[in-house]
Image: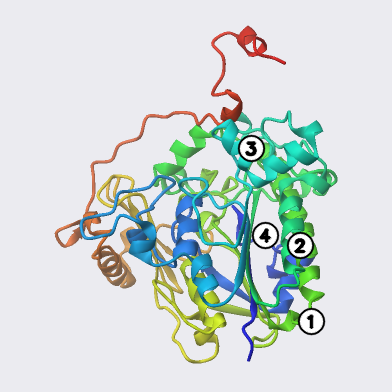
Amino acid sequence: MSQPNILFIMTDQQRFDTIQALGNQHIYTPNFDRLVQRGLAFTNSYSTCPVCVPARYTIRTGSEPPKTRIFSNARSKPVPGQPQAMEERCGPYLARTMSGLGYRTFGIGKFHTQPWDEELGYDVHLHSEELYGTPEQRNRDGFAGWIAREHPEFDFIEGLMGERTDMYYMPQMSPMPAEITVERWAADRAVSQIQSRDPRPFFGFVSFIGPHPPFAPPIPFNRMYDPDRMPNPVRGALEIDHQDEQIPFMNYAIWAEDINDAHARVLKARYYGEISYIDDCLGRILDSVEARPDADNTLICFFADHGDHLGDHHAWQKESFFEAACHIPFLLSFPQRLPANQRRDELVCLTDLFGIATHAAGQLDLRDGIDILGMLQGNGSPRETLIGYYGEPGTPLFKIMVRTREWKYIFMSNGGREQLFNLLEDPLESKNRIDQRPPALRSLREVALQACDVRGASDALAGNKLREFPFRERPLRRIYQFARSRGVTGYPKHPAEVLVHRQ
């Protein structure tokens, strides 16, 4: 059997519950539904470090944070005994690995590497990052450079994907028409690569920036959804929702500490508009795959790096182990080898993608994941528990999640706080069962201890217990994300200052 084409497609900050075919009747997603019908939809799929940078390194290395040493959007130093270079610690990146297996490779979109232009091993590598730190980076960014060359009438725009800072969670409309936004740019370049006459099979990675905030869908997707038809956020008791101190800290950082239900419904309407726009772009990509003679021998995997609280649990953004933040869509289709339109409830995660690609290519390389294709063919076992890490071990920011089919256990070093949810009985995670001490608690704590007793995570231990610190709230601060590439770094001391350098 010939090597299949392999296409990975991902979004940024897309919750699990945003696909109509998987149960959300408030949203219109005909092409995501089409992908669901083409293959398998995993219903217990997770980002094991639910924030942009570590999730992406998990995907490209097939390794979890103790090995990548990326537990947040910052990078931690390797521990003694670990090589300094990422690929020495984890092995060659996914694109480089696939090239070695005979694939032509292309990567398009957001990669969020450190540094921003890190060489990842793609034959064709076209960036579209969210922010530009310097004029040189903006010029070299694939999308921003294309706008400057091909559509200079829009090059004056400071935030090509919308305004950030205090506008992070304000409903917006794209400053550009749908035909030339970053999502359409990525889809069009993916189509060009899929249509290549190169006889080699392709490994493609398409990474959309949306629906990451700001929520700024283009016309007409900005007015697809009536906010009055949107459901309100799902909130529990504040003492449970905000046990994780990261949540109120982040709410304040992005000006989201006082969002009421009416505002939240408007934001959800724009968020859904972003997803429906990406769905439209996805349709162009799927059409190009289906137009190939080897369409049935093309494996497509769709996933997100993490979700968005969207007001659930009195929270916005990500970086928690509530389902809204870490439960992600994970669709796998391969008509020549896998059944169509099936739901699977095994515990899977982003780490498993490395094994999916290499197994399909004929040379399985699992690293820290499990062999999903082998499992589906009856040659491998599903995992019993799934581990999530966030924050550097040995610091108050560290937290760990243990997920089984029934239970979720979360330990937070800041104050030694614990949460335990029975997701079969309490899918909204509103009842912390930790004080009831069910029989599952001891075994879940033990799994958490074992998961930290590895190189790269052992600083999370204090003897035979998880290390804890006296609880403290971090000083609140705002995040400022202006157009640094054009010298804009913050608000002026006096309003007139913004006019001084106006062209």
Residue at the disc numbered 3: 139
Q: Residues within 10 Å of mark 2 (few under 14, many from 20)?
A: few
Q: Position of residue 238 (x, y in %)?
A: 46, 43
Mark 1 vs 2, N-terminal side: 2
Identify residue type, mark 2. Answer: Ser
How many badges with numbers are in the image? 4
Badge 1 is on which residue?
293
Q: Which secondary structure, mark 2?
A: helix
Do the residues bearing badges 1 and 4 touch, measured as CB atoms within 8 Å?
no
**Residue labelled with disc 2:** 192
Disc 3 and disc 2: Cα gap in Å? Answer: 22 Å
- The N terminus sits in image quarter: bottom right
Looking at marks 1 and 4 on the same chain, the residue that comes earlier in the sequence is marked by 4
Does 457 appear above or below 37? above
The residue pinned by badge 4 equals: 18
**Mark positioned earlier in the residue sequence (3 or 4):** 4
Residue 154, given in percent of the width and then of the height, sits at 78, 33
The quarter of the displayed image where residue 54 is located: bottom left
Q: Earlier in the sequence, mark 3 or mark 2?
A: 3
- Residue 32 picture quarter: bottom right
Q: Please tell me which of labels 3 and 1 falls first in the chain.
A: 3
Residue 319 visible from this viewpoint: yes
| In this rendering, the label closer to the viewer, 1 or 4 | 1
